[in-house]
Image: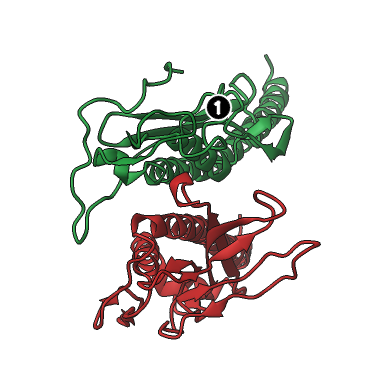
Chain colours: A red, B green
Amino acid sequence: MTRSRRRGDNAQAVLETALVIPILLFLVCNFIAVMVEVTVQEQLNSATALAAQSRFQAPENAFDVLGTRCCGAHGVTLVTSGLPTGCRYAAETFYGTMTTYTGLLHWKPATLCTSGGDSGNAGHPQAPPVAYAESPSNAEVSCDIGAVTTGGGVIPGYVDRTLNPPSGLDVVTCSASASLDFANTPLAWGVFWTPTLHAQAEAVPPPFRQ
Amino acid sequence: MTPQRAGHRHARQRGQTLIVFALGFALFLFSLTCLVADSAYLYVWSARVQVAAQLAAQSGADAVDPRYLYGASGSCPPGGTGALCPVQIVDISAQDRAGSLYAFERSCIQAGDQSGQIPRDSGNPLVLKSADDPQVPDGTLCASDGCRVYAEVSRVVQLPIPLPGFPGSITVRGIGYAAPVVGTDHAISTCTGTAWVPAPPPR
């Protein structure tokens, strides 16, 4: 084999490698990104479901006293004074469950605690939930829950008319939305999409509360 | 053997090796793809049923009336005798006592089946099981030990790319425990000493 032929072969190998390596890296980056997205979506589903259920750990008539704070993301704590204790329990459960890849998430700000809301049916119009006056609006999770005031007044939760139709059941719903941003990670080299993740969960009150 | 014939034979053998290697490598790559896809699918489902079990146990624990755990008395059900009767763990209303399930079992199984997306019929994954459906071969099993609610959610997962010679479905299982929370500022023990209701038969 002549020297020029060998040099030509070497150049071809270098060129092939230079073409193949970026494609392989691109594929690997996107595989990892999909894996992260699936993991975070599963975690978000779990967090909202457990948050909605944890509302029932608190009595219906329990409200947080002045100065109560709880959980939050990125060093921000949420002031929950005057809100139903169940709302704080839901938030604590949510933040306690969302533990991995949170640095990649850009949350959509939400009102922590709302009440009312109606899924609607033929006899009842749909109605949006209303925020509690004291509720922070910079939370990562939003829960629609009812309560009973010290005076015995009933603050309604979300009425799901598909349950126990047509009158519906007063349920607890929690939702959260975030976009997954890979910009500050090495994956940004090959991942050009920013998926938006959303999760919503509903918890039916236990029988002795219905 | 002449040197010319030996050269021909050597070349044929090289071609044969190449074909065998190509087929073997393709089979290896295919198996690897199957293994990765199936493992990822199983990993996701095992995480889902684990969360479903936790949610089921919590839902069951929330369905226990705290007054029962305190041994409190309440108004008697219609047809009962006396002014006050002990609060029962279950008989809140006819709706809750429908079928053979106690209220905490019903709540637990409903939450487990819904969260674990347990289909009533494996051919139609969109229709999920209800609490009254038989919870075999997959489903939610709930019991109490006198302190906590135990939930076990199992789901038969059909593998996306079944490997030839291996089962096409695998049962994944999640287990969760949760205790009812009662008390004022701090949760207190709710152990009653004996199981609230007889445990269901093991699966």
> Is residue A113 visible in the rendered structure shown here?
yes
Can you tell which quarter of the image residue A95 is in? bottom left
| Picture quadrant of residue A74 | bottom left
Q: How many residues crowd mark 1 within 10 Å: few (<14), some (14–19), many (20+)?
A: many
Tell me residue B154's x, y (percent). Answer: 50, 31
Q: In terms of depth relative to the viewer, which is nearer, B73 or A195?
A: B73
When asked about the image quadrant of residue B77, the answer is top left
Counting labels gives 1
> Which residue is pictured at 44% across the width and 59% down the height?
A47
The chain to which mark 1 is attached is B
The residue nearer to you, when weighing B11 against B108, is B108
Left or right placement of residue B193 versus residue A45 in this view = left
The picture places residue B44, in percent across and down from the top left corner, at: 51, 45
Name the residue type under label 1: Asp
User: Percent from the top left, x then y, of residue B47?
Assistant: 46, 45
Pick the quarter of the image with the N terminus of chain A: bottom right
